[in-house]
Image (tube, grey):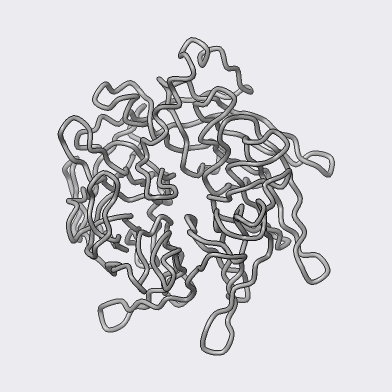
Amino acid sequence: MFRTNLQTPTVKVALIVLFALAVLLTVTAQAQTLTVLHNFTGGGDGAHPAAGLTSDSAGNFYGTTYGTTQYGGVDYGNVFKLVHKDSGWILTSLYTFQGGNDGATPNAEVIFGPDGALYGTTLFGGGGACRSGTGVYGCGTVFKLTPPSTVCHTTSCPWTETILYRFQAGNDASNPASRVTFDQSGNLYGTTDSGGTSGHGTVYELQPSNGSWSESILYSFSPGPNGINPKAEVIFDGAGNLYGTAPQGGQGCSGLGCGVVYELSHSGSGWIETVLYSFSGGNDGADPYGGLIFDAAGNLYGTTVYGGTNNPGGTVFELSPSSGGWRLTTLESLYGNSGPDATLAMGRVGNLYGTASGDPFGSGSVFELERSGGGWTFHELHSFNGTDGLFVYGSPVLDSAGNIYGTTNLGGTSQNCSDGCGVVWEITP
């Protein structure tokens, strides 16, 4: 999972040394069943997914792998498709990044556009003078993958990549860690961790124009009370305002900044940022890496990696409109060495589902917050043990039957990556 200072997704590997596998296997969960649908091998299927999944109307899943530079080889990541067939699942790679102008190391989910193509971002590659800690060059891209124009009858059916924009750093944006969001006019929006006028990240827009795309920087983050270095996507409200999180900056943590929730609203020909909440690092949490979701009443829900009453376990929070401002309520303080990195998902009856990169045993977990008697009841649905996955950085996805799907960055049974190459998993009630 990408974090501050452009870390690779395997930066947490050392944590597993602290916990013996025998201890991990003793963890109990609620009455749920986890099934590993795919063990990544580090070969043609890729390795180390750092984001969640996207589903289509047929029940197929699409995702990305971040890649690896282990064992003398370089894997710049891929976009894959997972199809249910007979009693199993088949994974095929739709596109494998080459690390050059086409992009490298996707860190976010792909989404479907109105034209049926997949849209996504890569953290590196594309161009510009940026360089990762593992030597991958380029400041990142926004890309489009188009399915074959004719029916494909083979198991391998590559899609065609088109680069919509290559970030250049400097006053331009760089290193997009989040997925993109469409507006009703077909324009794309996203955030970058770096770049902009102060180098601390941006919110950008891409508009289609005569067969190409033009970029506009809507907002550049600067050190101080307004937050810096956003990692998550932005979302729209019904009035066309944008909402997001920044894990650093703000007024909390003795002025160092524990992160903020922000709103961007139209003002004349530009956009104005309003900080809806600045985290203090106490019971309210700290470092919101994941994005936000709305409920039908207009309340916002999100997570923090650290803070809470069980610090550093992180929190799940609700932000509600109140007297012209916003009121934060901590719904749950989690236990563990690191809390949720990813955006929550909401079920049909309003229950919240999330993932945590750590847990009391440092391996990662999937949880549910159930609406109960005017409050919320916490359920840990699964705690990973290494062989079934390790470190969950992506958001969960629910199907119509209530099954939950996602990925882990490490773990699994493959011996081709130290600590495993990651898995795709399913949890059934």
Note whether 398 is above or below 297 in the view shown.
above
Coordinates of residue 113 in the picture (x, y in percent):
39, 64
Number of disc labels: 0
Picture residue at 38% right of the left edge, 74% below the top: 206
Coordinates of residue 59 in the picture (x, y in percent):
42, 44
Coordinates of residue 136 in the picture (x, y in percent):
23, 50
Coordinates of residue 74 in the picture (x, y in percent):
18, 40
Q: Quadrant of the N terminus?
A: top left
Q: Nearer the viewer, residue 244 or 29?
A: 244
Note whether 388 is above or below 40 in the view shown.
above
Q: Nearer the viewer, residue 239 or 231?
A: 231
Picture residue at 19% right of the left edge, 48% below the top: 157
Outermost residue, top side? 22
Picture residue at 24% right of the left edge, 62% below the top: 129
Note whether 377 is above or below 198 in the view shown.
above
With 88 as the anchor, is 323 left or right in this view?
right
Q: Nearer the viewer, residue 65 or 329?
A: 329
Q: Nearer the viewer, residue 220 or 113?
A: 220
Q: Quadrant of the C terminus?
A: top right
